[in-house]
């Protein structure tokens, strides 16, 4: 004899959240958006060094030469730079 009372029967065919189609769609949308954001971020990191270019070695040498250029001599013959450093 079969039990027809629904309250005593167990529901074995219930859908869980992780098996639902809505959750699958949510995960797909989330993964696509994260992939897109990472793609944009990599592009920014690739282009950013062009705008933050450091001075070349030649420019650094020229700046060092200008910094060490003697601006004046004192009475004893010592040379000084513009920022007041004594060279010799």
Image: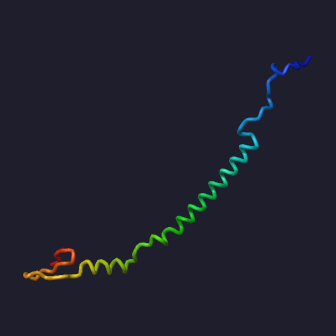
Residue toward you, 56 or 71? 71
Q: Residue at x 60, y 61 (%)?
A: 39
Query: Percent x, y for residue 26?
Result: 69, 47
Can you say whether 41 is above or below 60 in the image?
above
Q: Is residue 43 left or right of residue 3?
A: left
Toward which corner of the image does residue 82 lie, by quadrant? Answer: bottom left
* On-image quarter of the C terminus: bottom left
Colour convention of the picture: rainbow
Query: How many discs mark residues in the rendered view?
Result: 0
Q: Is residue 68 left or right of residue 51?
A: left
* On-image quarter of the N terminus: top right
Query: Percent x, y for residue 67?
Result: 26, 77
- Check the image and name the residue furthest to the top: 1
Toward which corner of the image does residue 78 lie, by quadrant? Answer: bottom left
Toward which corner of the image does residue 68 lie, by quadrant? Answer: bottom left
Query: Percent x, y for residue 60?
Result: 34, 77
Can you say whether 13 is above or below 73 in the image?
above
Q: Residue at x 36, y 79 (%)?
A: 59
Q: Residue at x 76, y 43 (%)?
A: 21
Query: Percent x, y for residue 73?
Result: 13, 82
- Check the image and name the residue furthest to the right: 1
Residue toward you, 6 or 57? 6
- Check the image and name the residue furthest to the left: 76
Can you say whether 35 is above or below 51 in the image?
above
């Amino acid at each position: 004899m079969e039990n027809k009372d629904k309250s005593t029967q167990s529901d074995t065919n219930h859908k869980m959240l992780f098996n639902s189609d809505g959750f699958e769609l949510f995960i797909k949308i989330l993964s696509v958006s994260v992939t897109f954001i990472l793609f944009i971020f990599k592009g920014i990191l690739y282009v950013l060094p062009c705008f933050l270019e450091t001075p070349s070695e030649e420019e650094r040498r020229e700046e060092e030469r200008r910094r060490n250029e003697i601006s004046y001599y004192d009475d004893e013959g010592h040379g000084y730079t513009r920022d007041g450093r004594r060279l010799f």
